[in-house]
Image: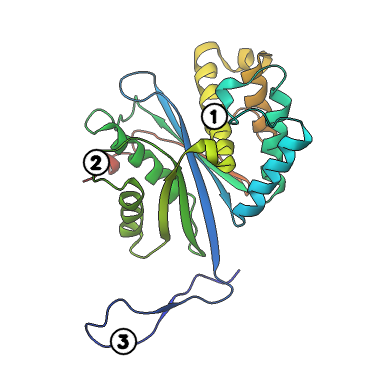
Amino acid sequence: MTSYQAHSSSHQKGSGPPQVSLPLAAESAVYFVDEAGSKGTLGKHFVVAAVRTKDPDFLSREIKACRERNNFTKADEIKFSKVTKHSEPILLDIFRAAISSGCTFGAFVLDKRHFDPWSSREQWQGHLFATDRLLRGLVTRREVGVVMLDHIDVPVGVSYGDTLVNSLNNRFGNKRFATAVSLDSRTCPALQVADLLASSVFHARKKIEDVGLEAFLEDRSPKARLSKGIAAALGESHFSDCRTSLLKIETSHERSLTELKRQRYS
């Protein structure tokens, strides 16, 4: 793959930003980001996950076709929390369709026993902290990224997407992400797939800690079956930390968060 290159034309002083020309081989990627887990003082884990695709239109059409093929068109939203014995194989089929469409996936698991971003920040800033950490671990130097986020509440006058993109690009020292926008997940099938991943990771981590790995692997409830099915579709058994060509999962740990604890979002 050709490395990302940006060529700026010469321009007169005071004429505004330089014109930018990207080579035809430059890559672009869209990251659909959703979250699951406990915020504030509740619970121990918070998970933010992303579905990465180079062709978001194709992904949306594949999800729609899969829903129609399974006669699963009446549900307003694909959501892990609403899985039933009947819908579990259908939701798994939808996730497999996302894999077949060429998506890759990532998740960042925030263990709040190591560091709780909500202890000293507003709720939206805690989300921003975790999402920033996830995307920094996924984006490559060979692409320009766009981020699609599940909507969260922020104070009046705050642009969550712009704040996130500025945080990321300032850290990289270049424009790695072009823009980010918050959407209603009910209108965005790819965000619903991100929910399936985030919730599957959270469910697995929570249950394994509560009852142990063996009991989780033997659990036949719809949520456990879906979580394990999605893990298996991604080449894993129970969402432990991994780094493959298809899936990247990272859990926070105390040493790695020393620098992040000093980070503050305005």
Instruction: From the image, state whether disc 2 or disc 3 is nearer to you.
Output: 2
Give SS at disc 1.
helix
Per the model, the C-alpha gap separating discs 2 and 1 is 32 Å
Q: Is residue 126 above or below residue 266?
A: above
- Circle 2 packing at 10 Å, graded few (<14), some (14-19), many (20+), is few
* Element under disc 2: loop
In the rendered view, tell whether residue 194 sits above or below residue 223.
below
In the displayed structure image, the side of residue 138 where residue 1 appears, left or right: right
Question: How far apart are the alpha carbons under marks 2 and 3?
Answer: 37 Å
- Quarter of the view holding residue 169: bottom left
Q: Which label is found at residue 212?
A: none
Judge whether residue 256 can be spotted in this image.
no
Q: Residue at x 33, y 40 (%)?
A: 129
Q: Residue at x 67, y 37 (%)?
A: 95
Q: Which callout, 1 or 3, points to the residue nearer the camera? A: 3
Residue 15 position in % (x across, y down): 26, 83
Q: Which residue is identified by label 2?
A: 156
Q: Is residue 5 left or right of residue 80?
A: left
Residue 262: give x, y in percent of width and height. 22, 42
Tell which circle, 2 or 3, labels the residue nearer the N-terminal end: 3
Say whether marks 1 and 3 touch (CB < 8 Å). Answer: no
Amino acid type, mark 3: His
Please state which amino acid type lies under the numbered disc 2: Val
Instruction: Categorize mark 3 by other alpha carbons within 10 Å: few (<14), some (14-19), many (20+).
Output: few
Residue 199 at x, y percent in the picture: 53, 28
Side of 116 where 234 appears, left or right? right
The residue that mark 1 highlights is 201
Secondary structure of the residue carrying tag 3 is loop
Placement of 220 over or under 71, stated as above or below? above
* Residue located beneath label 3 in the image: 11
The extreme front residue here reads: 74
